Amino acid sequence: MKTGKAKVEVEFPSNSYKDIGVDQLVIYSVKKILDNSEECTFERLVCECFRLFPKKFGFLRYPNWPDATRINKAWLRCRTDKGWLAGTVKEGFRITAAGEKVARDTENLLKNKNKTRRKLPIPKPRERYEAIIMHIKKTPEYQRYVNVAGYEINEADLRSFLGGTLETPRRILRHNLNLYMNAADIYKESSVFPFLEICKKKLEKLRG
C-alpha cells in the first residue's frame, strides 16, 4: 500500500530564505494573509509559514509537518520584544507600521536572493510614510479618538496602538511612536498630529 506525501506549495526556493530570520519570515507571512483580506488566526499563520517556507518551519525529523511551537515563539517575540505585531491567539493578529516595513524589506530580500547580490532598492519615502499614515487611521484606537466624544486613551489602548502588550518595554513603544510621528511630519498629515501628541504625553507617564 502506497502512502503519498502531502504536496506543499512553495513560493520561494529554500536557498532564498535560509539566511533570513524566523521572525522576519513570520511577519512576511502575516502580511500575506492580511493582504489577502483573510483573518490572521494562529492556525492560519502556521499554515502560511509552512506553505511558504517549509524548510524553515518544518520539523527536522518530520519535514512534512509544521513546527507550530517555533512559530508560536516567533510571533510572541515579534509582538512583545520588537513591536512588529499586535493581537493574540484568541483575537487574531494585525501588523504594526514597524512590522509593515519589516515585511516589505523581507519581501525585497526574498525576491533578490537569487539575483546578483546588491543593495536592496530603498522604497520611496513618500510611499512608505503614506502606508504608515493609512495604518494609523485604520487602528481601532484612532477610530475611537475620531468618532467617540471625550475619548481618552488608556494604557492598554496605547500599548495596542503602538504594537505592544503590557510586557513591552517603553523604549520599543517610544520607537514605534517616533516612527508614526516622523511619518506624519514628512507626509504633512496634520489630522493625526493631535492624537499622536496625546499618545506621546500618555507614554511619558508610563513606567518601564
Image: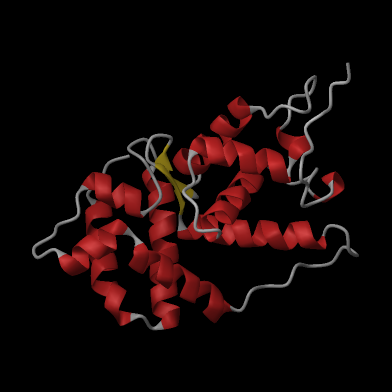
Q: How far from the left and from the top, in percent, is residue 190? A: 30, 81
At 44% across and 56% down in the image, what residue appears?
Answer: 175
Q: Going by the picture, which residue comes out furthest to the right?
A: 116
Q: How far from the left and from the top, in percent, is residue 157? A: 26, 49
At 19% across and 49% down in the image, what residue appears?
Answer: 154
Q: Going by the picture, which residue comes out furthest to the front?
A: 1
- Left of 46 or right of it: where is 162? left
Q: Going by the picture, which residue comes out furthest to the left?
A: 150
Quarter of the figure with the C terminus = top left
Q: In the depicted view, which residue is nearer to us: 88 or 105? A: 88
Q: How far from the left and from the top, in percent, is residue 114? A: 88, 58
Where residue 22 sits, quadrant-wise, is top right
At 23% across and 46% down in the image, what residue appears?
Answer: 155
Quarter of the figure with the N terminus = top right
- Left of 168 or right of it: where is 65? right
At 60% across and 33% down in the image, what residue appears?
Answer: 71
Q: Going by the picture, which residue comes out furthest to the bottom?
A: 188
Where residue 60 sits, quadrant-wise, is top right
- Left of 20 or right of it: where is 116? right
Task: Determine whether 129 is above or below 41 in the image.
Answer: below
- Left of 63 or right of it: where is 179? left
Q: In the depicted view, which residue is nearer to us: 55 or 166? A: 55
Task: Determine whether 29 is above or below 177 in the image.
Answer: above
